């Protein structure tokens, strides 16, 4: 019980940690990608500004080389500055948005540089190059393009990221929380089921082991009063009981591990039902009715289907007062096998529980009657593995009816 109380807290802690790790990993990744995006975007836009400035500088230089004080190229706006400087730094020509002073520090004739300068509220990307050819002293042309558009575009992306990244992390957190919860729940239920399985199996095995030990101790303590038959018979019976229990446990373990391998052969299930009717008649004093058996064929594992019918027959025989009936029929849902008894029956609220493992509803299902609580659980698992289903209902005989439905073989479909 203490472990069960701790489980929800532990699951919540694991859920929180998993969600936090997912958000942190995604957050760091998104931030790194965003920084790389911003650096790449700004570099690309700045490259475009530089190329445009170089092109305009070339046009101005060609104009001055061909004729002094050639008119500036048309279309200059506030986002562009153009200056032509003499060798001593005198401004020979300037666009209207630049004051009379050089936009950048004095350059040596023929220098070619790229730099930034601020004029007013704008920052310009400036290229400088000497003018080659023409008459007169050396001159330098300066062309600058404003970086306002680059800055605005970069900040626009930053604003989108500042809104988008938190929203993305919220989506990641909610999604991770929602996905991890059911997964952890399933894992915890599986672990709890495994613990219960081991506990129940240990409890079931303890009984025959204790019985064997008891008989052995009696024989050792009173060798003159106990015959070999007195010891061998109960030990043999308990050993068989242990063998059956271990086989059942191994089968259910294979089911849990999805390691149950089934053959898919054509099986005349009516023959298997008849074999079970004959076995019950030979091993019990009950009246076993097989008159309702009809020719039926399914695809499946003949050995496992035989085990299903044996468990179903043993369950009916264990609770019947005097009569057990087995029948087969073809229905729209497939091949239906019914196993009826005239026992006490099963209350409607307990009919689904009887297919759970180690479930005994009353004293009639106690260990001294031979039931381990695994027979019907195996029936349900094997039938499900064949694509069928099982159910409990009221029997026409007055007791319980176990109804097994299996898909019909293709050559047996009506």
Image: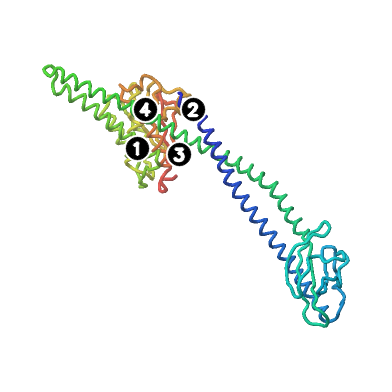
Residue position for label 2: 6
Where is residue 281? Give x, y as percent.
28, 29
Residue 222 location, quadrant: top left
- Mark 1 vs mark 3: which is more N-terminal? 1
Q: Seen in the image, is 374 located left or right of residue 92? A: left
Compare residues 154 and 173 and report the one nearer the observer: 154
- Mark 4 vs mark 3: which is more N-terminal? 4
Q: Seen in the image, is 216 located left or right of residue 57? A: left
Instruction: Classify 10 Å Cα crowding around label 3: few (below 14), some (14-19), many (20 and above).
Output: some
Residue position for label 4: 200
Residue position for label 3: 331
Compare residues 318 and 133 and report the one nearer the observer: 133
Mark sitting on residue 180: none
Mark sitting on residue 251: 1
Q: Report how far apart the C-alphas of labels 1 and 4 lie in the structure.
A: 15 Å
Where is residue 252? Give x, y as percent.
37, 36
Furthest residue toward left:
224
Q: Report how far apart the C-alphas of labels 3 and 2 lie in the structure.
A: 49 Å
Q: Are marks 1 and 3 in contact (CB under 8 Å)?
A: no
Where is residue 171? Give x, y as percent.
63, 43
């Amino acid at each position: 019980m203490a472990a069960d109380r701790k489980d929800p807290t532990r699951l919540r802690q694991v859920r929180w940690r998993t969600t936090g790790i997912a958000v942190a990993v995604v957050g760091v990744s998104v931030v790194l990608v965003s920084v790389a995006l911003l650096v790449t975007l700004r570099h690309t836009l700045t490259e475009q500004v530089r190329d445009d400035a170089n092109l305009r500088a070339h046009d101005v230089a060609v104009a001055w080389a061909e004729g002094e004080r050639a008119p500036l190229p048309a279309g200059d706006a506030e986002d562009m500055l153009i200056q032509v400087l003499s060798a001593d730094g005198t401004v020979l020509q300037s666009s209207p948005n630049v004051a009379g002073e050089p936009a950048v520090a004095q350059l040596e004739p023929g220098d070619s540089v790229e730099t930034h300068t601020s004029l007013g509220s704008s920052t310009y990307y400036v290229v400088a190059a000497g003018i080659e050819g023409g008459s007169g002293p050396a001159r330098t042309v300066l062309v600058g393009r404003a970086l306002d558009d680059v800055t605005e575009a970069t900040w626009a992306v930053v604003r989108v990221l500042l809104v988008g990244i938190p929203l993305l992390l919220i989506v990641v957190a909610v999604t991770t929380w929602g996905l991890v919860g059911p997964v952890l729940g399933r894992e915890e239920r599986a672990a709890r089921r495994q613990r219960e399985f081991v506990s129940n199996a240990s409890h079931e095995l303890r009984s025959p082991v204790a019985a064997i030990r008891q008989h052995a101790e009696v024989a050792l303590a009173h060798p003159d009063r106990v015959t070999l038959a007195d010891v061998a018979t109960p030990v043999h019976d308990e050993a068989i009981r242990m063998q059956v229990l271990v086989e059942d446990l191994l089968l259910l373990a294979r089911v849990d591990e999805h390691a149950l391998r089934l053959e898919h052969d054509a099986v005349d299930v009516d023959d298997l039902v008849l074999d079970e009717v004959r076995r019950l008649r030979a091993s019990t004093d009950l009246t076993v009715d097989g008159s309702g058996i009809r020719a039926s064929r399914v695809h499946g594992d003949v050995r496992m289907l035989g085990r299903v019918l044996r468990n179903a027959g043993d369950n009916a025989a264990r609770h019947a007062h005097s009569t057990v009936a087995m029948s087969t029929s073809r229905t729209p849902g497939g091949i239906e096998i019914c196993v009826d008894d005239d026992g006490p029956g099963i209350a409607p609220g307990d009919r689904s529980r009887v297919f759970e493992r180690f479930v005994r509803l009353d004293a009639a299902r106690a260990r001294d009657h031979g039931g381990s609580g695994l027979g019907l659980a195996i029936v349900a698992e094997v039938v499900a593995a064949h694509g069928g289903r099982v159910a409990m209902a009221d029997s026409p005989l007055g007791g319980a009816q176990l109804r097994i439905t299996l898909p019909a073989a293709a050559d047996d479909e009506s």
